[in-house]
Amino acid sequence: MIRMPFNADLFTTIATNVVTAAVAYFGTIKGSKLQIKSQQVTTQQQIDSDRQTAMLQLQNEQQNLDDAISKQNEFTRKAIKNFISHEIKSNLTELIKSGDTLKMITRNDFPFHYTVNPSFKYDEYNNLKYELIKFESEEAEEIIGIYDMFQIIDRKRNFHDFNQFEYDRFKKYFDVCNSKYGKFSRG
């Protein structure tokens, strides 16, 4: 067997290279793990930021949609009020076309003998009443009450035929109707 002479420099070089390779290997592994961890943190932060941006965008779009719906509802409410107000004014004028009617209504707290024969219109109300009730407001309730007042007069014709509840309701909505749509002098 041939023996090779022991070369200390060769051994040192090999040992140094092995140690250097091992340190480099483990250093690379450790560096890669740190880089992966850093990348994961950055990715998670980006996901959180994107999620927050998306939520803000959704909130802004929802607010814009709510604003558009609110504007549309306000426009619809004003249009309904405008159409119906003309019909209410016409019906109120028809009811009190005789000056005596206004005087009799304003002076009596109880049903009285007085016959009217108005010709009320309900076209706009009948066309718009289902839209009107969607607003669920005091104004919508008043308009419905005013038309109830016209309908009870159409049915009864003589104020003496009203019971006290009907007459009180009639007076309430007559006053609302006159103050908002008529401005007729009270007696």
Image: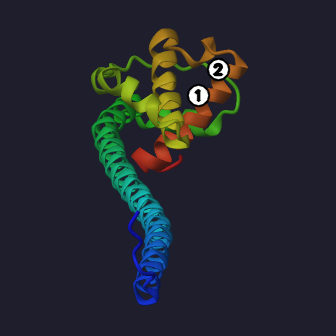
Q: Residue at x 64, y 20 (%)?
A: 166
Q: Amino acid at mark 2?
A: Glu
Q: Is the residue under label 2 in contact with that under label 1 (CB below 8 Å)?
A: yes
Q: Secondary structure at mark 1?
A: helix
Q: Nearer the viewer, residue 10 or 103?
A: 10
Q: Residue at x 45, y 75 (%)?
A: 18
Q: Which residue is mark 1?
A: 170
Residue 2 marker: none
Spot occupied by residue 34 in the image (x, y as percentages of width and height): 49, 71
Q: CA distance from mark 1 to mark 2?
A: 6 Å
Q: Quadrant of residue 129?
A: top left
Q: Is the residue marked by circle 1 packed among few (<14), some (14-19), or many (20+) residues within 10 Å?
A: many
Q: Position of residue 105 (x, y in %)?
A: 57, 34
Point 42% across, 79% down: residue: 14
**Left or right of residue 82, residue 34 in this image:** right
Q: Name the kind of residue labelled 1 in the image.
A: Phe
Above or below residue 76? Residue 57 is: below
Colouring mode (rainbow / by chain / secondary structure / one colour)? rainbow
- Residue 184 seen anywhere in this rendered image of the structure: no
Q: Which mark is residue 166?
A: 2
Q: Which is nearer the eye, 62 or 46?
A: 46
Classify 99 as above or below 16: above
For the residue pair 28 and 120, the one nearer the viewer reads as 28
Q: Is residue 163 left or right of residue 34?
A: right
The picture places residue 53, in percent across and down from the top left corner, at 39, 62
